[in-house]
Image: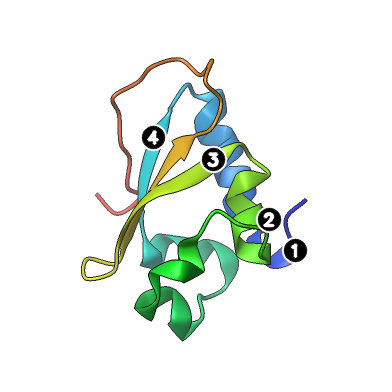
């Protein structure tokens, strides 16, 4: 279960999975807007985005997603579904389009 701060990210990713998406690309700013800000370490350290058991990772992992690509220079992250049975979909979505 994600911490309260990252519950909106978990809910967003759950909705995207329900829509059939298997990959979602978001800007850090989109995520920061959802969760009330990101710490400076999220912008500087790739490890912050690790798929471990820290509270932020539980935000996406509890919804069945994993971080597959982190672009620190571009401030973007690509989430993909962990569910091997998820419907294939080439779509990537950024809320800032």
Residue 78, image x, y percentages = 36, 48
Q: Earlier in the sequence, mark 1 or mark 4?
A: 1
Question: How dense is the environment of label 2, judged by Cα within 10 Å: few (below 14), some, or many (20 and up)?
Answer: many
Q: Which residue is mark 3?
A: 65
Lower position in the chain sequence, tag 3 or tag 2: 2
Image coordinates of residue 54 in percent, x first then y, are 66, 65
Q: Is residue 90 visible?
A: yes
Mark 1 crowdedness (10 Å alpha carbons): few <14, some 14-19, many ≥20: few
Residue at 50% x, 24% y is: 19
Disc 1 target residue: 4
Q: Are marks 3 and 4 in contact (CB under 8 Å)?
A: no
Distance from disc 3 to disc 2, alpha carbons, whole Å, reads: 13 Å
Say which residue label 2 marks. Answer: 7
Residue marked by disc 4: 23
Vertical position of residue 18 compared to residue 93: above or below: above
Give the answer, above or below, for where 46 lies relative to 11.
below
* Disc nearer the start of the sequence (3/4): 4
Discs 2, 1 touching: Cβ within 8 Å: yes
64 over 4 or under it: above or below: above
Q: Nearer the viewer, mark 3 or mark 2?
A: 3
Badge 4 marks a residue whose secondary structure is strand
Position in image of residue 18 (x %, y %): 56, 25
């Amino acid at each position: 279960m994600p911490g309260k701060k990252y519950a909106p990210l978990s809910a967003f990713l759950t909705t995207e999975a329900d829509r059939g998406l298997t990959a979602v690309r978001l800007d850090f700013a989109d995520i920061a807007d959802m969760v009330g800000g990101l710490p400076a370490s999220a912008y500087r350290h790739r490890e912050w985005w690790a798929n471990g058991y820290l509270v932020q990772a539980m935000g996406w992992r509890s919804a069945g997603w994993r971080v597959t690509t982190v672009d620190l220079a571009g401030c973007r992250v690509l989430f993909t579904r962990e569910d091997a049975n998820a419907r294939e979909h080439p779509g990537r979505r950024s809320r800032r389009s």
